[in-house]
Amino acid sequence: MESQTIIPGQFGKKFFNVEMTTMNFILLNMATLNVFFFFWICNMCDSINKYYNEIKFTKVLVICMIAFFMWGDVLLDPDDIRRDQALFFLTFSIFVAGPILAIVISFKSRPYIEKMLAEHGVPSQLNGFLCFIFAGFYQYYCIRNAEVRYRGQSAPIAQQSSPADSKFDQIEKLASLKNSGAISEEEFLVEKQKILSE
C-alpha cells in the first residue's frame, strides 16, 4: 500500500475551505454575534452536499435554524413577555428551536464527516457528547485539526509496527484500520499476506 503524505490542515482546507484556528473561529464568532457561526453551518452543509454529490442537508433546515435563532432574540422582550403568557410560550419555543436544529444538524453531519475523514486517510470518530454540547463548533475543530488528531496513526503501516510486534498484533492493527475505513479490503489482504510471508 502506498503511503500518503499527510499535511496538517490539508483536509479542512481542501473540502471545507477551513483555514483559521479553532480559537480564532470562536473569537470571530463572538465578535460577529454568531453571524460567522451561521456562515460556517451553511458552508459545512454545502460542502458535505458537494462531496457526496447529492442533497444530505436541505437549505430549508439550515435557514430555519438561522431564522429561529434570530427571531428568538428579537422576540425575547421581557416587557412583552410579562404582559402575555401565550407570547412567552411562543417566544420561548422559537428561541429553543434554533439550538435544537443546530444539534440536529450537528448529529446529522457526524457520520458524513467521519466517512470523509476515513476516505482521505485520516479516520477518526466524532464524540457524540461533544457534538451535542458544542454543536457546529466541535465539527469545525475536528475538520480543522483532522491530521493532528490522527497524527499517531498517520505513518505508513510498515513503519507503525516495531520489529518487536508479533505478526498477530500487526494483523490486528491492519484489521482496525480496515474497520475504520482507512484501508480497503483488498489493501488489507495484500498487507496481511506480506506480514504472513515475512
Image (spheres, rainbow, N blue to C red):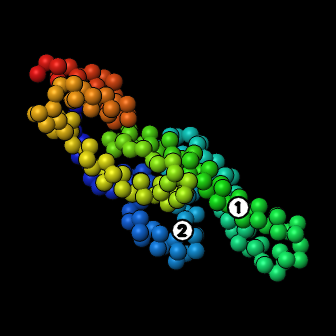
Q: Position of residue 124 (x, y in %)?
A: 38, 44
Res. 171 visible in picture = yes
What residue appears at the point 67 percent right and 52 percent down from the top-left corner?
A: 61
User: Disc 1 marks which residue?
Assistant: 96
Crowding near the residue tagged with mark 1, few <14, some 14–19, many ≥20 C-alpha atoms within 10 Å = few
Q: Position of residue 50 (x, y in %)?
A: 51, 46
**Image-based side of 65 in relation to 169, left or right:** right
What residue appears at the point 42 percent right and 71 percent down from the top-left corner?
A: 24
| Circle number at residue 67 | none
**SS at badge 1:** helix
Res. 63 visible in picture = no
What residue appears at the point 44 percent right and 54 percent down from the top-left corner?
A: 16
Q: Position of residue 120 (x, y in %)?
A: 35, 42
Q: Quadrant of the N terminus?
A: top left
**Image-based side of 87 in relation to 178, left or right:** right
Amino acid at circle 2: Phe
- Rendered position, 139 above or below 94: above
**Image-based side of 27 in relation to 80, left or right:** left
Which of 26/14 is in front? 26
Number of marks: 2
**SS at badge 2:** helix
What residue appears at the point 46 percent right and 73 percent down from the top-left corner?
A: 27
| Circle number at residue 36 | 2
Q: CA distance from mark 2 to mark 1?
A: 20 Å
Amino acid at circle 1: Val
Q: Earlier in the sequence, mark 2 or mark 1?
A: 2
| Figure quadrant of residue 185 | top left
